[in-house]
């Protein structure tokens, strides 16, 4: 039987910002904000029982369901014209547009992210576990699910329904609060920096490839590289 643990609930709180903004300005996008809230509640409820073994390759499937497939299905059902689905993909950063620029920015910002991770680990203490290249690769792949949701849905899509500032603050706050285990640790510095760097790439390119490079490589660095070196 599944154990109930809604530890991700804090990430729901920042949604108050776009919701109040839409209500105050009498915008029709209030419904889309509520759809996002429904998706996030679904994630909060089912994240723990479906992702107990975070080092299992099956975690890629479960997180893909929660962070990618469910949001896509709900947003697709909302579309009045199903032919617009390709435009929705472009709206959330799944596009060939600016892909090269996104990759270049990802590569440029990556050393900053890795340096911050190194400093945080240096202060806290380097991992004592063995280096695991396979798990590092799995974690790299799985990191796309979070980029899709926190940068694709909660920034790019939300920005199209509100404005840049509202979407930026909401996305960053939700991402930080989705890691409550880091709130009382120096790891939160890395979480904040990663959130800002990936948002900046999305802001400049409207493409998720660069953010995925930063997020995924940072995970691989933490799991496979640092334990190997130290």
Image (spheres, rainbow, N blue to C red):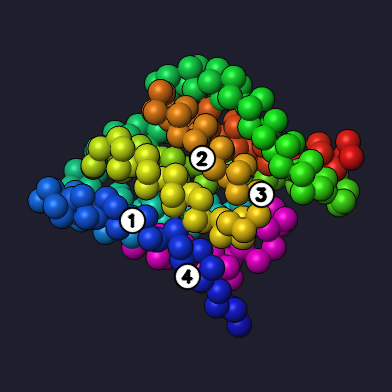
Q: Position of residue 40 (x, y in %)?
A: 40, 60
Whichever of labels 3 and 1 marks the residue nearer the N terminus, that label is 1
Magenta span of residues: 38-57
**In 3D space, how far apart are the residues under numbered discs 3 and 1 (Cα atoms)?**
25 Å
Instruction: Give the residue displayed 37% in from the left and 43% down from the top.
Output: 169
Residue 71, disc: none
Mark 3: few, some, or many residues within 10 Å (few <14, many ≥20)?
some
Determine the residue located farthest toward the left in the rendered image.
26
**Label 1 element class:** helix
Q: Nearer the viewer, residue 3 or 23?
A: 23
Q: Position of residue 60 (x, y in %)?
A: 61, 51
Circle 3 or circle 4, nearest the eye = 3
Q: Is 126 contained in the magenta span?
A: no
Instruction: Give the residue displayed 19% in from the left and 43% down from the top.
Output: 81
Whichever of labels 3 and 2 marks the residue nearer the N terminus, that label is 3
Q: Main secondary structure of the magenta part?
A: helix
**Label 4 element class:** helix
Label 4: which residue?
45
* Badge 3 vs badge 2, beta-carbon distance below 8 Å: no
Label 2: which residue?
195
Mark 2: few, some, or many residues within 10 Å (few <14, many ≥20)?
many
Instruction: Give the residue displayed 30% in from the left and 35% down from the top.
Output: 164
Residue 15, disc: 1
**In 3D space, how far apart are the residues under numbered discs 1 and 2 (Cα atoms)?**
17 Å
Whichever of labels 3 and 4 marks the residue nearer the N terminus, that label is 4
**In 3D space, how far apart are the residues under numbered discs 3 and 4 (Cα atoms)?**
27 Å
Label 3: which residue?
186
Circle 4 or circle 1, nearest the eye = 1
Whichever of labels 4 and 2 marks the residue nearer the N terminus, that label is 4
Instruction: Give the residue displayed 69% in from the left and 38% down from the top.
Output: 117
Quadrant of the image for the N terminus?
bottom right
């Amino acid at each position: 039987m599944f154990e109930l643990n809604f530890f991700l609930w804090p990430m729901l709180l920042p949604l108050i910002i776009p919701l109040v903004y839409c209500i105050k300005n009498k915008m029709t996008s209030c419904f889309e904000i509520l759809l996002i809230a429904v998706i996030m509640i679904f994630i909060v409820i089912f994240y723990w029982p479906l992702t107990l073994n975070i080092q299992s390759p099956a975690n890629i499937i479960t997180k893909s369901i929660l962070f990618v497939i469910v949001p896509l299905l709900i947003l697709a059902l909302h579309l009045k014209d199903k032919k617009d689905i390709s435009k929705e993909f472009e709206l959330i950063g799944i596009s060939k547009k600016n892909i090269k620029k996104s990759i270049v920015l990802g590569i440029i910002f990556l050393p900053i992210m890795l340096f911050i991770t190194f400093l945080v680990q240096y202060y806290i203490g380097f991992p004592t576990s063995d280096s695991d290249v396979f798990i590092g690769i799995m974690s790299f792949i799985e990191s796309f699910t979070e980029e899709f949701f926190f940068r694709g849905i909660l920034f790019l899509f939300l920005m199209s329904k509100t404005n840049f500032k509202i979407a930026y603050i909401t996305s960053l706050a939700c991402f930080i609060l989705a890691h409550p285990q880091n709130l009382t640790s120096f790891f939160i510095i890395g979480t904040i920096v990663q959130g800002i760097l990936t948002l900046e790439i999305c802001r400049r390119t409207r493409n998720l490839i660069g953010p995925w490079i930063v997020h995924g490589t940072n995970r691989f660095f933490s799991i496979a590289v640092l334990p190997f070196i130290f």
